[in-house]
Amino acid sequence: MIPANLERAVYGMYATHALGVAGRHGVFEHLIRHGGDSAGKIAAALAVDEDTLERLLLVLSSFGVLDAYGDRYALAAGVRPYIDREDPCYLMGFVEHLIGDTSGQFGRLSGYLHAGKAETDRDTPAPFEAIYRDDESVGRFLNAMWSLSHHVSHELAALADLSDVRRLIDVGGASGPFSVAALHTYPQLRSTVFDLPQVSPYLAARAAEHKLGDRLDFAAGDFFHDPLPAGDCFAFGYILSDWDDETCAKLLRKAYEACLSGGRVLIMERLFDEDRGGPLATAVMNLSMHVETQGRHRTATEYLDLLRHAGFTDGTVRRSSGDKHLVIGRRTESGFER
Ligand SMILES: C[S@@+](CC[C@H](N)C(=O)[O-])C[C@H]1O[C@@H](n2cnc3c(N)ncnc32)[C@H](O)[C@@H]1O
């Protein structure tokens, strides 16, 4: 008998794909609308093959995503917010990114083991050249980031207490998952998302959707080559986990130099337990960072060290109820120590 934890690890790939296919073909929307239904009725309503659909439903039931009652399937308790397109917790954009972009890159891991990452990736485009290779891929990535980041950003914005901040610079802020939440929370705040030019229309669409007017603007640039706009608060949401320590140090130092005296920096990231024994999602995404980017996930202590080396003082850690947390540093005139 395969132990249950090994069995889930072996067959997990089927669950990810079943989730993606069911989401793409409207199965979850149907279940939300009807509260539950048989494979035959769902297949008829969605005009899909019943045999294939039932096999997918059985996989999702086996993994506990659905409950089966006789021939009826319904969403298991607690699942709905994450598969409901209308809910802020919606996670299926991220699932699409895992299927469409991440999984195809795992083949390189054997090369990493034998020849190292640098040698194996020698002819591979830089992380964001690959992720932004075409419009479809840009849209899928930015949707995934919105899925992962927007909901928890309300909590992160509250934890950050930005009531005295005037201009937030959201470095690599994507289509604005954090900026939008922060602007909704703090009426005095204005935010500039600084990101690669491909991101511009996606930020404009979110700004319009959330009726933020000129409180949210976009500065196109490359944070390796261009100066950052000045501000009194710099946000780095899921940025430092894309890069190695040396690059993180340069980015944080750049933020320190652009930050007004008395201002602060917000690092928002998954945090490994100090012994790196978990959480599971951080361990998994740490592997994902290896194949998709040049980064890794870190412990709170490692982020506090990076902040201190860049000159920020008063490092503090504030944990959210989700899996993205906050590490804050302040710019005081006497702060810089190398
Ligand atoms: C992992 S996403 C994080 C998005 C968002 N901050 C969040 O918390 O969800 C990384 C972001 O960094 C941006 N980025 C990558 N390289 C960049 C560069 N050289 N200059 C500016 N932005 C960059 C990407 O376009 C993307 O929006």
Image (cartoon, grey):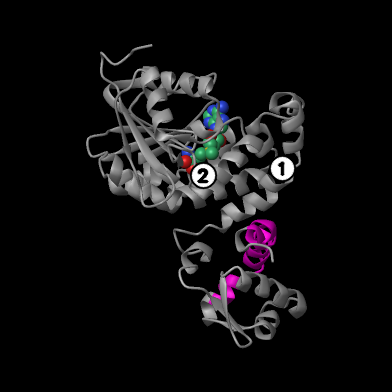
- Mark number, residue 282: 2
Magenta segment range?
A: 6-31
Determine the residue positioned at 64% across, 50% down.
Answer: 98
Where does label 1 land, which residue? 106
Q: In the rendered image, which quarter is residue 286 located in?
A: top right
Residue extending farthest to the front is: 1
The quarter of the rendered structure image containing the N terminus is: bottom right
Work out whether mark 2 precedes mark 1 in sequence or the reverse, and give the earlier one: 1
**160 left or right of 194 in image:** left
**In the rendering, at what x and y percent does residue 94 appear?**
57, 52
Majority secondary structure of magenta residues = helix
Q: Is 209 located above or below residue 113 in the figure?
A: below
Residue 317: horizontal and vertical position, in percent? 33, 37
Q: Amino acid at mark 2?
A: Thr
Quarter of the image for residue 333 reads top left
Query: Which type of secondary structure does the marked residue at label 1 adopt?
Result: loop
Residue 11 covered by magenta stretch: yes
Q: Is residue 261 left or right of residue 32?
A: left
Mark 1 belongs to which amino acid? Answer: Phe
Query: Is 298 a magenta residue?
Result: no
